[in-house]
Amino acid sequence: MNRLWALLSAYGATFVTLLQGLLSAALLTRLLAVETYGVYAQYRAVAGLAVTALSFNLGHGFLRFGSALEPPARRRMMATIITAQTLIATAALACVLPFGQRLSLAAFDRPDLWLWVAVWLWSLLTLIQVQLQNSLVIVQRAALAYAVTTAYRVASIAALGVLFLWPTLEAAIGVSVAVMALTTAGLAWLTRAELLAPRLDLAPLRELLAFCLPLLPVQLALWVCASSDRFFLKHFEGLESVAHYSLVYTFASLIPVLFSAVSNIFLSAVSRWHDAGERERVDRAFSQTLRAYWLVGSGALVGVFVGAGAITEMVAGPRYVFGEVRSVALWIAAGGFVYGFFQIFTRLFDLARRPWSVSLTWVIAMLLNLGLNTLLIPPLGMSGAAIATGLSYLCAFAVAWLIRPDVVRFELPRAAMLAHALAAVAIGLGAAWLAPAGVLAGLAIAVLAGALVLGCGLALGVVDPRALRRELLQR
């Protein structure tokens, strides 16, 4: 029951995350000028790169090994990670500031140094927040971690009300940093029993880095696949295209959240079972997770494709709707759908202690993404960026499948999944052809199409609800 409650809490937080993403996009796009929203989107992309590069993936190592440590050792590990990441982030800011104006012009079309300070603050707070959340997950208080995340999302939406009085870039970024700081302070109070004074224990840090550094290229390559297209669009098309594309990306890329919402719980649980020799339990967990993600993710993919225009107009108004919006949404959503499967398969390499193998997949995907962006964006614009994104994620998953370690035996109804895929394609194309103009009618058709895909999957036996429920109720 504890696992079920943690999962329900995670998905409750995920629902609020989806809502926050849409409401934030609605406020930002309606209250800021289009180019200003484009700059804000660039700021978030740069901050995402900073978090990825400066994390050294240490949080992943903390989840993998912290569960097996005694409390004193676990606390020392977390203190060392937070101290190391703080020092690294501050050193990075010191290196950037002398060239800040030139870099700001290249990234944001603005020569403002304060943007880099904002990136540093937001990134550092995010890094600390991740470790505090991981600590709650490790000590079996995941529900509390997700409750705090939910509160953060709600506060973010409320704080953006400042834009009604001060609709500027400075206000939007200031709100994001302030809410992140308050949330981090709240998490620190909740985890105060786990916190130690800053320390830098080099021996455990070296051991963590030996496991985590091979995964850093994965994270950097993932950022390239997810965000580098904004910089290509800015160069070839301008900030207005960045704004339009970023809005569609906001809702079309949310499908992998269906798994990533519970990925930390999943990794912590299967790591314990694998280390304890419970092979059958690990097999069931992977198989049930993959089947459930296939079922729900395919329904979401069809819904996003059918309702792309209606969702865009509902969120940002008609000025953000463009001709190829459905094509862009389809490719981004398909890439996100495949990335969710990749996240599941990544855990196989964690269990086998082969994190370096994952780097190969993402280095290939990154190079493909950069090449496709260069080739496709000049002639195709936003559609070219979306196609590059989708194909890059597909490439990463294909390579991961081919080199996966033999640590789990998957039990998958392959014939049922193939039939379900064909049915989803037919339903999506038919619903897109039938979808009328107008926001409400378009959304209704999209929801019905997604629900029909879910129903077909259940009827075909892609997921056995009773078996899934039994698995979740097991301690």
Image (tube, grey):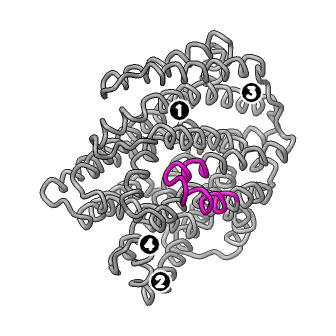
Between the residue at mark 3 and the residue at mark 2, the CA separation in whole angstroms equals 48 Å
The tag on residue 107 is: 4
Contact check, label 1 and label 4, Cβ < 8 Å: no
Q: Give the residue type that dot 1 points to.
A: Leu
Residue at the limit of the structure toward the bottom, as seen here:
98
User: Badge 3: few (under 14), some or many (20 or more) residues near its Cα, within 10 Å?
Assistant: some
Q: Going from the N terminus, do you reach mark 3 or mark 2 first?
A: 2
**What amino acid does circle 2 point to?**
Val
**Label 3 to label 1: alpha-carbon separation:** 17 Å
In three-dimensional space, the C-alpha distance between marks 1 and 4, rounded to whole angstroms, equals 38 Å
Query: Is residue 104 placed above or below 235 in the rendered structure?
Result: below
Q: Earlier in the sequence, mark 4 or mark 2?
A: 2
Earlier in the chain: of badge 4 and badge 3, it is 4
Q: Where is residue 47 in the image (x, y as percent from the top left)?
A: 45, 65
Given the current orientation, which residue lies at the most extreme right position?
406
* Mark toward the viewer: 4 or 3: 4
Q: Which residue lies furthest to the top in this view?
A: 459
Q: Name the residue under label 3.
A: 284
Nearest to viewer (mark 4 / mark 2): 4
Determine which of the numbered discs, if any, sits on residue 7 in the image: 1
Q: Reading the chain from its start, which is encountered first: label 2 or label 1? A: 1
**Residue at position x 47%, y 83% in the image:** 96
What amino acid type should be assigned to the residue bearing mark 3?
Answer: Arg
Magenta residues? 368-389
List the residue tagged with mark 2.
96
Distance, label 4 to label 3, CA atoms, is: 46 Å
Quarter-wise, where is residue 439 in the image?
top left
